[in-house]
Amino acid sequence: MEQISNFFLDYYEGATTFDIVLEATVFIFGIASVYFSKKENILVYPTGLVATIITVYLLFKAEYYGDMMMNFYYSVMSIYGWINWARKKDGTPLLPISRTNKKEKIIGFGLFVLTMLVTFGVYKAFGREIETANYIDIFTSGIFFTAMWYMAIKKLENWTLWIFADLITVPLYAYRGLGVLALQYIIFTVMAVQGYLVWKRNIGSHVDS
């Protein structure tokens, strides 16, 4: 029991109260954002923006530049998704849940590759030595960004990508000693599975969010 407790608390030994409060805020708003996305509720974006903007600061401070860049992308994509989900005609949302077509799959793959290249460039620009964990970070960054775009255009496949990348991220954060973040991604994985099942049932629907 003590080892488990240390796993979650050791990381915070040198942390300031301010940073701990910020991380708690990210934890709460991050989970709220996934909850709202599962419900196809537009609040996914304002709650997500709170979490990602704070996370950019925290990850920059911790020198996890790949993750930092990813959360910066999330912030930009959240604004795009917010605008896209808010579009209505005669009071009815214009964007239904659907599956990706061939063109969107190609674009998604292009975003995946481009994001990995940009994230790699960020590490190099900051003069960081790229270790195995960083390459995993670069890989998951590409998946997460593509998932974010698919969510912004309400494609079912966004959940498949979230689940895959979340499962990789859990042991990555555990390896780094970031127990709370590892726990958060376990919760994200469970909620992403639920989100996939809900969206699959609602393909073709317009939810007034």
Image (tube, rainbow, N blue to C red):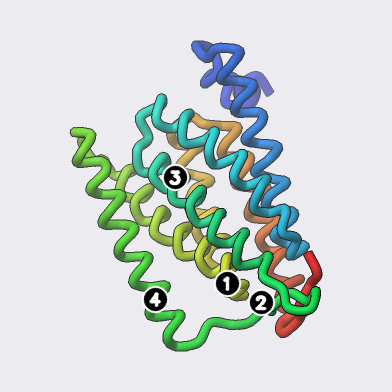
Helix, strand or loop status at disc 1: loop
Q: Which label sits on residue 153? A: 1
Amino acid carrying label 3: it is Phe
Q: Horizontally, is 66 left or right of 143 in the view?
A: left
Amino acid carrying label 1: it is Ile
Quarter the N terminus occupies: top right
Mark 4 neighbour class, 10 Å CA radius: few under 14, some 14 to 19, many 20 or more:
few
Between marks 3 and 2 in the image, the one whose residue lies nearer the viewer: 2
Residue 188 vs 10, above or below: the answer is below
Q: CA distance from mark 1 to mark 2?
A: 7 Å
Pointer 2: what residue? 95
Residue 3 vs 127, above or below: the answer is above
Q: Are the residues at dot 3 and dot 2 in contact (C-beta closer than 8 Å)?
A: no
Q: Residue at x 63, y 26 (%)?
A: 4
Q: Splitting the image into 4 quarters, where does residue 5 fall?
A: top right
Amino acid carrying label 4: it is Ile
| Front residue (pair 30, 153) | 153
Pointer 3: what residue? 72
Pointer 4: what residue? 107
Q: CA distance from mark 4 to mark 2?
A: 19 Å
Q: Residue furthest bottom?
A: 102
Q: Are the residues at dot 1 and dot 2 in contact (C-beta closer than 8 Å)?
A: yes
Q: Residue at x 63, y 55 (%)?
A: 189
Counting from the top left corner in percent of width and height, residue 71 is at 47, 45
Counting from the top left corner in percent of width and height, residue 56 is at 46, 36
Mark 3 neighbour class, 10 Å CA radius: few under 14, some 14 to 19, many 20 or more:
some
Helix, strand or loop status at disc 2: loop
Helix, strand or loop status at disc 3: helix
Q: CA distance from mark 1 to mark 3?
A: 19 Å
Counting from the top left corner in percent of width and height, residue 106 is at 38, 80
